[in-house]
Amino acid sequence: MNQLNVCLSPALIPLYNVEDHIVVIIDIFRATSSICYGIENGAEAIIPVSLVEECAAYREKGLDYLLAAERDGKVVEGFDFGNSPFSYTKEKVAGKTVVLTTTNGTHALHLSRAAKKIVIGSFLNLTSMCDWLKLQNDNILLVCAGWKNNFNLEDTLFAGAVVEQLKTGDFKPDDAAIAANDLYQLGKHDLNEYLKKTSHSERLKKLGIEKDIEFCLQVDLITAIPVLDGEMLVKLQ
Amino acid sequence: MNQLNVCLSPALIPLYNVEDHIVVIIDIFRATSSICYGIENGAEAIIPVSLVEECAAYREKGLDYLLAAERDGKVVEGFDFGNSPFSYTKEKVAGKTVVLTTTNGTHALHLSRAAKKIVIGSFLNLTSMCDWLKLQNDNILLVCAGWKNNFNLEDTLFAGAVVEQLKTGDFKPDDAAIAANDLYQLGKHDLNEYLKKTSHSERLKKLGIEKDIEFCLQVDLITAIPVLDGEMLVKLQ
């Protein structure tokens, strides 16, 4: 029987043998949602980086990169756009390579590097990704990117949504997978309402990204699955 | 407003400023349950250690220590008893100092060492401990000892039970505290039934400690609160 494990914080990744797993990276607000939407909309590739400075360095490479960087919810001066999924439309990203600054997401990706395969999950591509995972007949590790290594509720809720779709299959869930799925049972009828009680919903409100949040909580808007290929996320074929 | 934080694994303790918190150590099956019961029953002190060898070393000290060590659910030869709460009765421990081998619990204790105060929690002393915590007007960090740094459901469920009693007070819960409390809502009507789905309930069954499990899930059997004093856990006065 294959394992279905949920890693509640990147700080716990070393507890797992990632080399025996397909890893799903989860950073619902907003990195992995924007990545899924951008790949769906024809971005040739998305390159995740940790720091604004790393992102800026791509400008020097002279190629036709789109650079995405935010600080405190605002696009950093000199950059093309920020992390809002609304920036990742066909008009903006089709045929382009986007360099996306995401501290938590990149951290989770780097620590999972030894995995058999790394894909990117969000509510936007939930069922499509679960259908693909079911076909792999392999161990699965759902990695919640969290917030500065802390547990967060939205990434865990999404992990629970994946467990919900996979649990009828031939998987053995660990305790974190069981807990995530139970939390999803409580929140699934109204994800947005459930997440209003999180510790950082006020921070998100202050950033003025409530529309982004609503967008990121749409289930099955798209079908593309981003997969890591070297340093780049591309569309899984 | 004081913080009410839940640390879901000892590996996450470094994320918190433990020196600004009162820490509650939680290892429901069975270390902290046995410690609470032993202190209630008049043990003068309980000394938690990580390894069977450290426990054995107390024999050399020539004093009247009771030594508790288990491997695979059985008392190690030459030791007085194991980790079953049924060994921590008045008849056995009153007036004695017990050296208790607990890998996960000791690990959590050591990483929390800088805390303002460290107390020991279990369902057995739940309300008594919560009443005391309410009076402290301080930040609280509930540390789940887990299993080899992994998240586990029973310690998280207990953290959720503490949040339940404190949440009407002047506390700001973090996301992990909110999640733990939600899980407790699902499990509180029948803790034992809820925990049957955990990944290691089969392991516990194989160890033949189902009666211990039932014992550890009794709510408010006692009122004693063990507190760390140097290397020893003693009764909070």
Image: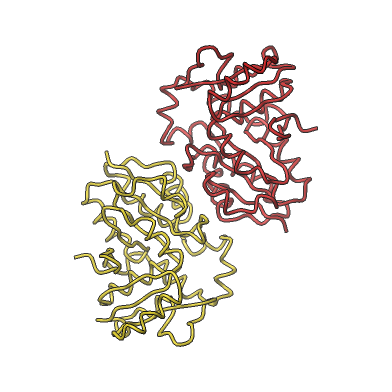
Chain colours: A red, B yellow
Q: Taking A4 as reference, is B82 above or below it? A: below
In front of the other: A151 or A233: A233
The structure residue drawn at horizontal position 27% and vertical position 63%, both measured from the top left corner, is B227
In front of the other: B32 or A11: A11
The structure residue drawn at horizontal position 33% and vertical position 62%, both measured from the top left corner, is B120
**Is the N terminus of chain A in the top left, top right, bottom left or bottom right quadrant?**
bottom right
Q: Taking A164 as reference, is B30 above or below it? A: below
Q: In this view, does B49 lie to the left or right of A195?
A: left
Instruction: Kindly give the residue lying farthest to the front in the view shown.
Output: A60
Q: In this view, does B50 lie to the left or right of B133?
A: right
- Where does residue A58 sit, x and y in percent of width and height? 63, 20
In front of the other: B67 or A161: B67
Instruction: Kindly give the residue lying farthest to the right in the view shown.
Output: A237
Q: Taking A204 as reference, is B30 above or below it? A: below
Q: Taking B38 as reference, is A94 above or below it? A: above
The structure residue drawn at horizontal position 37% and vertical position 63%, both measured from the top left corner, is B123
- Where does residue B174 sit, x and y in percent of width and height? 40, 41
> Which picture quadrant has residue B175?
top left
- Where does residue A224 sit, x and y in percent of width and height? 73, 29
**How many marks are shown on the rendered structure?**
0
> Which picture quadrant has residue B204?
bottom right
**Is the C terminus of chain A in the top left, top right, bottom left or bottom right quadrant?**
top right
Instruction: Kindly give the residue lying farthest to the left in the view shown.
Output: B237
- Where does residue A133 sit, x and y in percent of width and height? 73, 43
Q: In this view, does A190 lie to the left or right of B80?
A: right
